[in-house]
Amino acid sequence: GAVVSQHPSWVICKSGTSVKIECRSLDFQATTMFWYRQFPKQSLMLMATSNEGSKATYEQGVEKDKFLINHASLTLSTLTVTSAHPEDSSFYICSARDLRKPGNSYNEQFFGPGTRLTVL
Amino acid sequence: AQSVAQPEDQVKVAEGNPLTVKCTYSVSGNPYLFWYVQYPNRGLQFLLKYITGDNLVKGSYGFEAEFNKSQTSFHLKKPSALVSDSALYFCAVRDPGNTPLVFGKGTRLSVIA
């Protein structure tokens, strides 16, 4: 299957600082990317959906000014957690899909390995 | 709206015994169904999917799942559990449109030697 990478795999930052997480599709073009967060021992909750070149669509309850998503190219999406606080500590997972991939009639969604954010 | 229910927070089985992890779903139209496994501090690993065709789907590591439309279920099964199968298992669903996967809350499987 296709490969999605995330960088960094983990990050520790001080409260009030901003952190950027990168998500890259390595061998395909991601027309759509999704960002999920996962609290300890809980499920993945969808934060937002972004289509290349368009503004992200945020799920209800997710602050768009706090979680800035940029999907400027077909292989890169970034999530910036602005003015991070301890409650933002979580495991962030990105996922990508190529709507145009030949033979991928059901538009499989590929997942990155996740980024663990710890805010002190 | 799509939704997934995993009614068991935890499942414990003895090594060598069969295991079942339950999943029921709700989606308008035909569902695309998936199972993923997550080991501690790791991302998701794909196990298997149902898109169309045979109701019994075989996946990675000896796992299989049966799509039951009348019961709206997609239970994960394995004939003989291994200690190394101990992990967190997620069922996920989406409809055929360009919608994201929606995950169940997860079931922690513990296989006891």
Image (tube, rainbow, N blue to C red):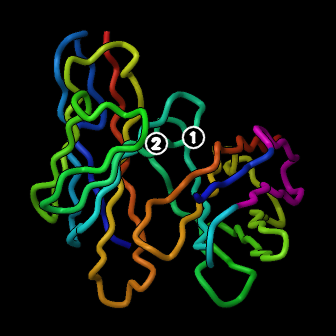
Secondary structure category for the residue under label 2: loop
**In the depicted structure, whether residue A18 falls above or below residue B88:** above
The image quarter containing residue B76 is bottom right
Q: Judge the density around disc 1: few (<14), some (14-19), many (≥20) Cα neighbours within 10 Å.
A: some
Any part of residue A21 in sight: no
Residue at 82% over, 58% down: B20
x%, y% of residue B107?
A: 71, 44
Callout 1: chain: A
Residue at 20% over, 17% down: A83
**In the depicted structure, whether residue A74 falls above or below residue A84:** below
Residue B22 falls within the magenta-colored stretch:
yes
Secondary structure category for the residue under label 1: loop
Q: Report the magenta residues as a range.
A: B8-25
Q: Judge the density around disc 2: few (<14), some (14-19), many (≥20) Cα neighbours within 10 Å.
A: some
**The N terminus of chain A, quarter of image:** bottom left
Label 1 sits on what residue type? Answer: Ser
x%, y% of residue A90?
A: 41, 28
Residue A43 bears which disc, if any? 1
Q: Which residue is mark 2?
A: B42
Mark pair 2, 1: CA separation: 13 Å
**The C terminus of chain A, quarter of image:** top left
**In the depicted structure, whether residue B51 falls above or below residue B104:** below
Q: Nearer the viewer, mark 2 or mark 1?
A: 1
Label 2 sits on what residue type? Answer: Arg
x%, y% of residue B44?
A: 49, 52
Residue B57 bears which disc, if any? none
Residue at 77% over, 74% down: B66
* A24 vs B25, nearest the viewer: B25
Any part of residue A62 in sight: yes
Callout 2: chain: B
Q: Is residue A70 left or right of residue B95?
A: left
**In the depicted structure, whether residue B38 falls above or below residue A42:** below
